[in-house]
């Protein structure tokens, strides 16, 4: 994982004109819709088991 992952598009309007926003890691602003948002890593999911039945 990198120190600063870059989003490819705005989660609100899907425009690609994004710039870093603020001093905190993961904060971005969209110049198209004038929204600021924060992205963060929550965690990893457990591997998915094939078959769909109980473990």
Image (cartoon, rainbow, N blue to C red):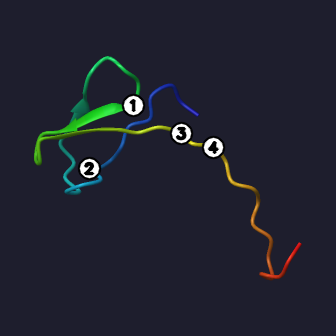
Q: In the figure, 23 relative to 47: above or below?
A: above
Residue labelled with disc 1: 26
Q: How far apart are marks 1 and 4 (CA)?
A: 15 Å
Find residue 12 and report its image quarter.
bottom left
Label 2 or label 3, whichever comes before in sequence order: 2
User: What quarter of the picture does the N terminus occupy?
Assistant: top right
Label 3 or label 1, whichever comes before in sequence order: 1
Q: In the figure, 4 relative to 52: above or below?
A: above
The residue that appears at 26% across and 49% down in the rendered structure is 10
Find residue 55 and report its image quarter.
bottom right
SS of the residue under disc 2: loop
Farthest top residue in view: 23
Residue labelled with disc 3: 41
**Can you give x and y, in whole percent of width and height, for residue 4 in the image?**
45, 28
Q: Distance between the residues labelled 2 and 3?
A: 17 Å
Q: Residue 10 carries which label?
A: 2
**Can you give x and y, in whole percent of width and height, for residue 51 in the image?**
81, 82
Q: Distance between the residues labelled 1 and 2?
A: 13 Å
Q: Are marks 2 and 3 in contact (CB under 8 Å)?
A: no
Q: Residues within 10 Å of mark 4 (few under 14, many from 20)?
A: few
Label 4 or label 2, whichever comes before in sequence order: 2
Q: Which mark is residue 18?
A: none
Residue labelled with disc 4: 43
Q: In the figure, 53 relative to 44: above or below?
A: below
SS of the residue under disc 4: loop
Q: How crowded is mark 2: few (under 14 residues within 10 Å), some or many (20 or more)?
A: many
SS of the residue under disc 3: loop
**Can you give x and y, in whole percent of width and height, for residue 50 in the image?**
79, 76
């Amino acid at each position: 994982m990198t120190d600063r992952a870059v989003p490819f598009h705005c989660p609100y309007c899907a425009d690609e004109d994004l710039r870093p926003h603020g001093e905190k890691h993961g904060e971005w602003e969209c110049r198209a819709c004038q929204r600021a948002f924060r992205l963060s890593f929550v965690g990893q999911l457990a591997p998915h088991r094939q078959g769909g039945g109980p473990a």
